Image (cartoon, grey):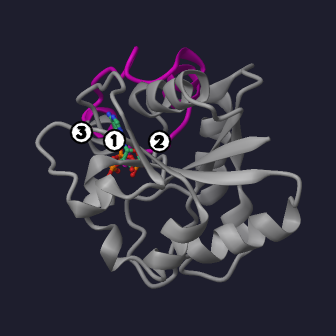
Amino acid sequence: MKVGLFFGSFNPIHVGHLIIANHMATHTDLDKVWMVVSPQNPLKPKKTLARDFDRLHLVRLGIGDNPRIEASNVEFNLPKPSYTIDTLAFLTEKYPDKTFALIMGGDNIASLHLWKNYEQLLANFDIYVYQRPGTELGPLATHPRVKVLEAPLLDISATYIRECIRKGQSVRYLVPEPVFEYLKDNTLYKV
Ligand code: ATP
């Protein structure tokens, strides 16, 4: 089974994330997509980052009942800050029957040469890249392990959603309905 890992802070998850996850799970040879929730980095200010388990809960609510997409909290218990190469090493050992691949936006492939052990990443894992407007993919996009896909994109971000919530503005339809309902009745992102 081939699993694509889609890393993010998902603070909170929004429909832009889910469109990408579903596209990768249905338009490629990936059997599944795991949305890997990045834990709080103890070295970084966490003023606007919701607690790990709140974000994980929202990712689960957002995915709903979809056999091809799952939420993963694997990085919560790994040393922090978590480096992708270390998470992949851990997952490869834990799930020897699965093949792991990475999913990332064009902005990330352009700066992949700055990641820890990026040569090792490219040598061992396929990378599925979705184009983002206004970003050059850079030279690594032509690497044989890299597959560039055209996926439908929405011009929304978690930052925008947090701003709306803080100002008391509606985020209906920008986040999946169960996430909207949860946020409506919760203090998350309101202060
Ligand atoms: P923030 O605004 O807080 O930085 P974000 O919405 O960009 O958050 P992340 O959780 O950091 O979300 O995103 C996870 C991954 O999804 C990142 O690689 C990011 O580039 C990508 N992503 C975020 N929003 C979109 C979108 N609307 N379309 C496609 N990809 C997106």
Q: Nearer the viewer, residue 93 or 191?
A: 93
Q: Secondary structure at mark 2?
A: loop
Relative image position of residue 114 (x, y in whole percent)? 32, 78
Q: Characterize the local packing of mark 3: few (<14), some (14-19) or many (20 or more) Cα atoms within 10 angstroms.
A: some
Q: Which residue is mark 3?
A: 132
Q: Which residues are magenta?
A: 164-191
Q: Which residue is mark 1?
A: 162
Relative image position of residue 142 (x, y in whole percent)? 31, 54
Q: Is residue 174 above or below residue 137?
A: above
Q: Is residue 115 above or below residue 75?
A: below
Image-quadrant location for residue 159: top left
Mark 3 or 1: the one toward you: 3
Report the quarter where the N terminus lies. Answer: top right
Mark 1 or 2: the one toward you: 2
- The residues tagged by marks 2 and 3 sit, at their Cα atoms, a distance apart of 20 Å
Main SS, magenta region, reads loop
- The residues tagged by marks 1 and 2 sit, at their Cα atoms, a distance apart of 8 Å
**CB of mark 3 near ligand 1 (< 8 Å):** yes
- The residues tagged by marks 3 and 1 sit, at their Cα atoms, a distance apart of 21 Å
Image-quadrant location for residue 67: top right
Q: Is residue 89 left or right of residue 123?
A: right
Question: Contact, CB < 8 Å: mark 2 with mark 3?
Answer: no
**Residue 184 is inside the magenta segment:** yes
Relative image position of residue 178 (x, y in whole percent)? 60, 20
Residue furthest to the front in view is: 144
Q: Which residue is mark 2?
A: 12
Q: Secondary structure at mark 3?
A: loop
Q: Secondary structure at mark 1?
A: helix
